[in-house]
Amino acid sequence: MKYAVVLALLLVGTFAFYDGTTDVTKLTTENYNSEVVESDDFWLVEFFAPWCGHCKKLTPEWEKAAKGLKGMIKMGGLDMTTDGDVVSDLGIEGYPSLKWFGADKTEPEEFEGGRTSTGIINFAMKKLKDVANSRIGNKKRPKVEKKEEKKEEEADTDDGDVFVVTDDNFAEEVEASKEPWFIEFYAPWCGHCKTLMPTWKKLATALKGTVRVGKLDATVNSEVGGRFGVKGYPSLKFFPGGSKSDSLVEDHNGSRDLDDL
């Protein structure tokens, strides 16, 4: 019996949970409140025990998801055997316990997705979409007639939460940023660009704090426009979080409705 206990302890010691070499933040009694509760970031947190076989099985998937979601949400892990007192109010009994911390950190939600990197990412993106739509009061896809949108655009020159990108600030604001960007390359005379602008502004407000939404007048900022092969307007390009290598930039060729964007 004594030998079995010693062996179990040794086996626990050989498995490292979130040792700082991945994108999962190791949460402790000391940093839990400042990192999670008091932050404006969205979090997915795993509450685990080192001896838990299901926790060990989940770890590589949790780390893959954290890498994929970097720059959009934060992911953490808290060892309940050493730091569980800091979350005693959450009533955690089983491991791993996975919780989503949205806008209200005092009421985290239970994770309801698959326990693979794909399932975790799908759950997180659905939550982000729900948050984005709730910020602007959307429950279903809004139906706005194009004539009304065009009239609104002509009368409103305020960019709202849309960041104006230029040849001069592209390197500093976009390339040097670790945040993901979604940029519209437009021409001022383009009718489709004018029609899109009200939706683009709503998108910028909905994604604020998650993805930076910008616009670049490609008729006067030809350096950046030419670099990314912009020929038609509007051209919508997504720059992922982290490295802004040209090869990682993706074109959005789908619908320009708010939900799809």
Image (tube, helix red, strand yellow):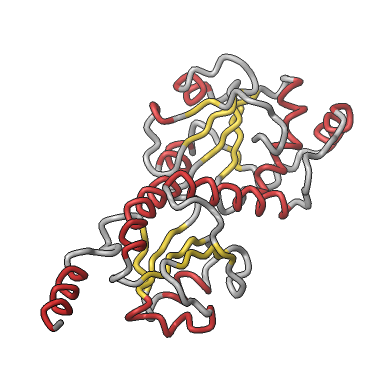
x, y percent for residue 41? 52, 61
x, y percent for residue 222? 52, 21
Q: Residue furthest left?
A: 3
Q: Residue at x 35, y 55 (%)?
A: 23
x, y percent for residue 245? 37, 32
Q: Answer with left or right where residue 153 lies relative to residue 46.
A: right
> Who is closer to the viewer here, 257 or 230?
257
Quadrant of the snapshot with the N terminus:
bottom left
> In the picture shown, does residue 196 fall above or below 17?
above
Quadrant of the snapshot with the C terminus:
top right
Q: Residue at x 34, y 67 (%)?
A: 26
Q: How many marks?
A: 0
> Who is closer to the viewer here, 246 or 61?
61
Q: Residue at x 85, y 34 (%)?
A: 144
Q: Examine the rendering and report whether any part of residue 54 can be seen.
A: yes
Q: Examine the rendering and report whether any part of residue 177 can be seen.
A: no
Q: Answer with left or right where residue 13 lies relative to residue 137.
A: left
x, y percent for residue 56? 31, 61
> Who is closer to the viewer here, 3 or 115?
3
Q: Residue at x 44, y 82 (%)?
A: 86
> In the picture shown, does residue 18 fall above or below 3?
above
Q: Answer with left or right where residue 173 lies relative to residue 48.
A: right
Q: Residue furthest top?
A: 231
- Quadrant of residue 218 within the rendered picture: top right
Q: Answer with left or right where residue 74 lies relative to residue 215.
A: left
> In the picture shown, does residue 140 fall above or below 225?
below
- Quadrant of residue 5 within the rendered picture: bottom left
> In the picture shown, does residue 97 fall above or below 1?
above
Q: Residue furthest front?
A: 1
